[in-house]
Image (spheres, helix red, strand yellow):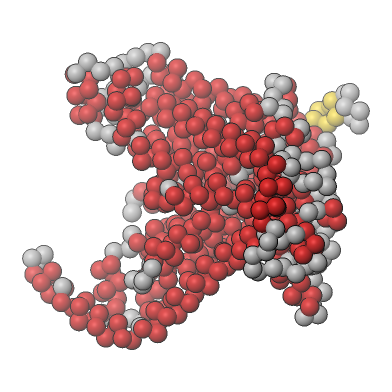
Amino acid sequence: MRRKVIFGNKLLPYLLLAPQLIVTAIFFFWPAAEAIRYSFLRQDAFGISVMFVGLENFQDLFADERYLQVVWNTIWFSFWVTVLSMGVALLLAVLADRHIRGRNTYRTLLIWPYAIAPAIAAVLYIFLFHPSLGLLGRALNGFGVPWDYRLNGDQAMLVVILAAAWKQVSYNFLFFLAGLQSIPKSVLEAAAIDGASPSRRFWTVIFPLLSPTTFFLLVINITSAVFDTFGIIDALTGGGPGNATQTMIYRAYVDGRVNLDLGSSAAQSVVLMIAVMALTLVQFRFIERRVHY
Amino acid sequence: MSQVQPAIAAPVPLAAEAPRRRRFLGADLTTHVILLLGVVLFAMPIWIVLMGSTHDAATIGRGEVPLLPGSEGWNNYATAWSEGNTRRASVPVSTMMFNSAVMALLITVGKLAISITSAYAVAFFSFPGRMLCFWAIFITLMLPVEVRIFPTFQVVSDLGMVNTYQGLIIPLIASATATLLFRQFFLTIPDELVEAAKMDGAGPMRFFKDIVLPLSATNIAALFVILFVYGWNQYLWPLLVTTSTDVETIVIGIVKMLGAEADTEWNIVMATTVLALLPPVAVVILMQRWFVKGLTETEK
């Protein structure tokens, strides 16, 4: 991965790297180190004295049933967002990949939601699901279904899952479409000539050949559902009702910024860092393996 | 064998094509129907907000959910633009849009600038600590702001950057993704080109300006779309580092407008939502070609 022909300057490369490295050191490494340091410390109620408490913050965290509930919420939420958004995206991509009229128009009309902020997606979903202002929310109540996601925890979870999945579909759609277009047409024709039905062709030829894309998207979707959905939850439910829609990021924010419980918030940050590292490693093992293909 | 194969293979798909056409006419219809449903699924929420933004507050408040345009459109947008939420002291949407535009553009330009120079250093120079620098940038992928919420705020506040544009922007401009993409691209620039430039007496900065930058135009365009959308849509970070309304961005502003429900002017919220959507959606649609290419190539 090294070039043969290079420039010989001694100082210049450091100058070129300096801005990025300075920002990285001040705003990434320093805070990350602080998070790790704080996670072993505890402040008294007045913020005057600080003492070393070892792993106590972590022990307290995992002994707290509400935190375990939050971890479970995160898993449940990410699972459904990933399954829904990938399923819908795959269906749409397979159809948009067929030789039909207007496929470019369909593509444009299916990718623009990529541009929508999570918090804005949440606002759009308020106008769909609000019990008295939303199109669907009102209809549900009209049909005699007691619907109010602001009071019912399960309904709140459903709405945040739908909003997050909705927002994620276009991203997945783009990758599935790119994956489908890279499958050699000759393979599909061979299967067609052998008399395989369209659904058989899909499950025995297309789907296995798409597996690198699928696996990549799986990791990316889980990561973004865990880390990138703060805006949706904050704008739609504020983590409520109770803490029915609180995820790990949301809880770390509330404890750190609102409750000012630094030790616990820092411990939660460390737990989250370990989670990102695990996800990134999974992704890299996979990329490494794919290089040999 | 390789000579014979095409001759046999060519006619077969054609023969298979003819009956397939007829058999799948129904399938084509189903394809269109499902794709259209997909389009509606995405467009519906926007349509509701767009139509709602042309009615008065009472209509929305009664829950009528108008699906056709009303007559209050001009008023709503004018009010939102110049006053914001009138019932509570709030920032005009024009100010929020300005703040969002400044943040998104400076984040984009900042990320592009510092990433392309660091990728250039890593790809075209040999110096002690080269791999260490590369890994230091790379590892930030594992430290998104979401996992270090409080300590990062602490650092920004120690530096006195709370409620400033610097505080909003600088901590976000490091970019491992952009650096990786540029480095990957730089490695494909042939050695001969570098040699020729050196022989002609071009120094590293000259080579960067006259050869590398123009060659990177497509990559820059693709990253511009991705990073602009990223910058415009930031939510958690502005929420942490801004408390004053002077630097409030539009994404934060809308969520604040929702505040206490009874007190919300829904028609203004809807108009503001449309305005907030417009810039990033326009960038994605207008620069679609680069964006699609950039996205599917960056992340892989």
User: Residue at the location (66% across, 56% down)?
Assistant: B73
Relative to residue A211, is residue A220 drawn left or right? right
Residue B239 figure quarter: top right
Residue A145 seen by the camera: yes
x and y percentages locating residue A67 in the rendered image: 79, 50
Relative to residue B299, is residue B69 drawn left or right? right
User: Residue at the location (60% across, 66% down)?
Assistant: B44
x and y percentages locating residue A232 in the rendered image: 68, 53
Residue B150 seen by the camera: no
Tell me how many marks there are.
0
As rendered, which of A238 and A210 lies closer to the eye? A238
x and y percentages locating residue B193 in the rendered image: 22, 29
Task: Give the answer, above or below, for where A20 lies relative to B75.
Answer: above
As rendered, which of B239 and A245 lies closer to the eye? B239
Task: Give the answer, above or below, for where A61 lies relative to A32.
Answer: below
Q: Residue furthest right?
A: A46
User: Residue at the location (33% across, 24% down)?
Assistant: B209
x and y percentages locating residue A4 in the rendered image: 26, 27
Quadrant, the C terminus of chain A = bottom left
User: Residue at the location (37% across, 13% down)?
Assistant: A10
Task: Give the answer, above or below, for where B80 lies relative to B40.
Answer: above
Residue B61 figure quarter: bottom right
Quadrant, the N terminus of chain A = top left
